[in-house]
Amino acid sequence: MMRSVSLSTPYTPPEGFPNMFQAAAWLISQFYNLTSDYVSAIALVAVVIMMLIFPLTLKSTKSMLEMQRVQPEMKRLQNQYRNDRQKLNEEMMKLYQEHKVNPLASCLPMVAQMPIFLIMFRVLRHLTLLGSDGTFNPGYISKTSKLYMSLDKSKEMLSVGLDLSLTPIKAIQASPGKGVVYALLVIVLMGLYFVQQRMIASRTVSPTMSASQQKIMQYLPVFFGLFQLFFPVALVVYYISQTIVRIAQQQYITRRFYRGEHSLGQQAQAASAKAREIAKQDGSGGGGIFGQMKQDLAKAKEQPKNVSKPSPTVSKRVTPPKGGATPAKGKPTPPNRPKPSGQSRHPKPPRG
């Protein structure tokens, strides 16, 4: 049976989950013991988490490049077996085994980061939970820790002149002048997301991604940044720190995989360009699911418009027309005799 959870009271997760939430809170608490500063503690946690995930990022990047390198062969198989889905899947599996590539390996960082994102989101929110008396009642951390004692019975989470418990939108509403600083943090976050997105897009162009999908990916940081207006600034600080580390990691990935003409990255880019040319010649033009929808629509339009009309149905009516004489049962209908010209149907009686 599920129970409702209020954000104003500490939440006790199911068995097995408290260790993950408490571990993240404990890590923040340890860095706070070293720095005595909330921003520094949160930023250091972001750095540690990104460094732990980085080996998975390297592995997924290499797998993604290997997948791009076999894209021309994949497009050839798709064209050859476009009408036989089962045979296509069999040939694709043979191709993966031959080149030792795993199509799911590129998803590892995303799979790993999703629970971490949820854990950090929950922990940072619970550090500044308001109790019944209107002051903080931090969750997930030991009541004897320095971090707990600094937040307990407080109403602000002050660091570098900012209240990290406030959301940017509330800060702007309370004081437009001071709220500008909070809004600038969100703008900085969106700018960092743009830099990261441009770094990835400049070296990786998917042959199955349409122009509209590329536009969506470019403006996705804007939408994500706007959502941060409604979350505590502590989360914005965490995302800024995380994105700075990710940009540095992407720079390292560029040097490692894309340096030199015969590097794996350069081979993947050449293969990706070749796959796009094959898609154009085939008329599909890529586009993923949207491209497939366009192909289906084009096929429907190519069908002949002049469909032969069905022949008119011959009436099988056996009932005599309305007003006509009904023949007696078992007797043939007498033929219609022509009426003599000039003779009345009912002759007049002779005059006396």
Image (cartoon, helix red, strand yellow):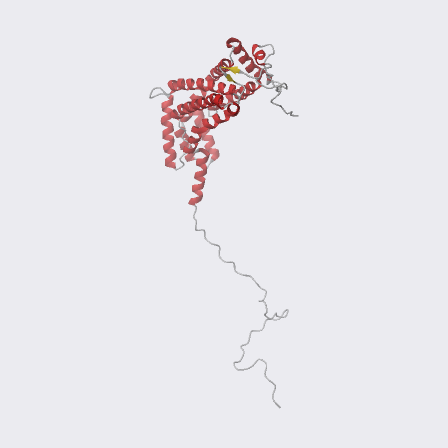
Nearest the viewer among 140 and 273 is: 140
Residue 282 lies, in percent from the top left, at 38, 36
Near-viewer residue (168 or 298):
168
Q: In which quarter of the image is residue 95?
A: top left
Q: Residue furthest bottom?
A: 352
Residue at x 43%, y 44% (from the top left corner): 301
In the rendered image, is residue 95 in sight? yes
Measured along the vertical axis of the image, is residue 18 above or below residue 216?
above
Q: In which quarter of the image is the N terminus?
A: top right
- The percent position of residue 34, horizontal first and vertical second, equals 51, 8
Q: Nearer the viewer, residue 19 or 297?
A: 19
Q: How many labels were placed on the picture? A: 0
Residue 56 at least partly seen: no
> Which residue reaches farthest right?
1
Image: 213 above or below 250: below
Residue 279: x and y in percent read: 39, 34
Task: Return the residue found at the far left.
Answer: 261
Residue drawn 45% across the image and 41% down it: 297
Image coordinates of residue 82 in percent, x first then y, are 44, 36
> On the picture, is 204 further left or further right than 148?
left
The C terminus sits in image quarter: bottom right
